[in-house]
Amino acid sequence: MAQDPWLLTPGPLTTSLSVKQSMLHDWGSRDSEFIRINGEMRSRLVQLIHGEGSFTTVPMQGSGTFAVEAMLATFVRPKDKLLILINGAYGKRMAKICDYAKRAYSVLEWAEDQPVNPQQVADALAKDKAITHVAVVHCETTSGVLNPIVEVGAVVAQAGRRLLIDSMSAFGALPVDSREIAFDAVAASSNKCIEGVPGLGFVLCREAALKECKGNAHALVLDLYDQWQVIEKTQQYRFTPPIHCIVAFNQALTEHAQEGGVSGRGGRYRANCKILIDGMRTLGFETLLPDHLQAPIIVTFHMPADPKFDFQRFYDKLRDRNYVIYPGKLTVADSFRIGCIGRLSDTEMKGAIAAVKAVLAEMGVKSGAPRKLAASAE
């Protein structure tokens, strides 16, 4: 069987053979073994944030955005006001969700290559007493920038407001510790750093806060409170669960623990990120972000200035060599992205660099340097 392409993307991503194999069976949603697996999955996720005894996992059928929308519309009541911290497309998506859900909100916005500034958050909360909740993206994959959620959590707690975190692309590789950060909920999904397959979002909810959320949601299918109540009482989902995805996700959680949990998984991704950045820089490419702002999740590179470089040809030729990268999503710079996450190691990352070098040579591109650097070198 031909080798699947290596997915150097922010998810879906490359999964292990054992995760794939775990889906080669069928279960009914009421089977005792599936119920056991689902319960184990929910408990393991709570353990990852050290939330035993105070948090619960509410799984949500669908992509990660389903979980984010469910979180915002369940925890933010129609009479509340949300402050959304935006430095990329996923913060903007939260604002769009609030438009649909008819939730009041204001925004603080930074450039896509800048992290959220906690002091500005504190100032905004001091000025607007109507704000009840704050929403932040942990790692904004538009650029790859890591936002300081610990510091943001501190100023939100000090102001007596409630924090909601979108940790979609970071959860499982970068710490989200409920003992260190006061948050009501954190949303993530199965097909990111845990290395499962797409189809399941989840929200880790502080039970005391979730108990206050009855009747808040704007949509039946996205009501976290109702989903939680039914699963707790019956061990069943309200609507058909993505069974194969859940079983694969639980297998991925087993492998995550075997690798050393958050620190082990994050360590491999950091090593992948270093190989990627060092290798691309040797070919002249420049990263959008300085190293101290770069999360080991996905890296944004400036487009080369060489007139022979064409991104679609570059992408297609890498795909022919079994490496799939990602287009850029920035407004501040012409760019493309390469991910560090998934079942990838130094072998695959070095192979990707070798493939990039070969493709540049085939295209006749002498350097990956962007225009400003190419001009300064002349």
Image (tube, rainbow, N blue to C red):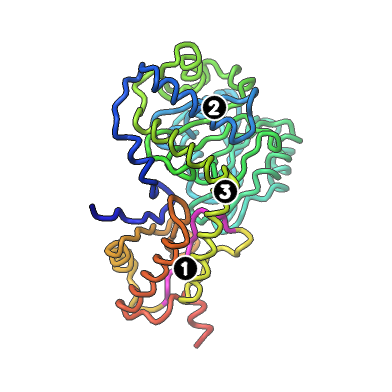
Q: Is residue 81 above or below residue 271?
A: above
237, 194: nearer the viewer? 194
Q: Is residue 195 above or below residue 186?
A: below
**Residue in the picture at 52% in, 54% down:** 269
Label 1 crowding class (10 Å Cα cut-off): few <14, some 14-19, many 20+?
many
Q: Residue furthest right?
A: 158
Residue 204 in the image, given as x and y percentages of width and height: 55, 30
Residue tagged by mark 2?
Answer: 43
Residue 313 in the image, given as x and y percentages of width and height: 29, 68
Residue tagged by mark 1?
Answer: 302
Of marks 1 and 2, the one in the foreground = 2
Measure the alpha-carbon separation of dots 3 and 1: 30 Å
**Residue in the picture at 57% in, 55% down:** 295
Tag 2: residue type? Ser
Residue 170 in the image, given as x and y percentages of width and height: 54, 46
**Residue in the picture at 43% in, 51% down:** 343
Q: Is residue 265 above or below residue 228?
A: below
SS at badge 3: helix
**Residue in the picture at 39% in, 71% down:** 354
| Horizontal side of residue 204 vs 208, given as left or right | left
Q: Residue furthest top?
A: 233
Nearer-N-terminus badge (1/2): 2
Mark 2 and 3 residues: CB-CB less than 8 Å, in contact? no
- Range drawn in magenta: 294-305
Label 3 crowding class (10 Å Cα cut-off): few <14, some 14-19, many 20+?
some
Nearer-N-terminus badge (2/3): 2
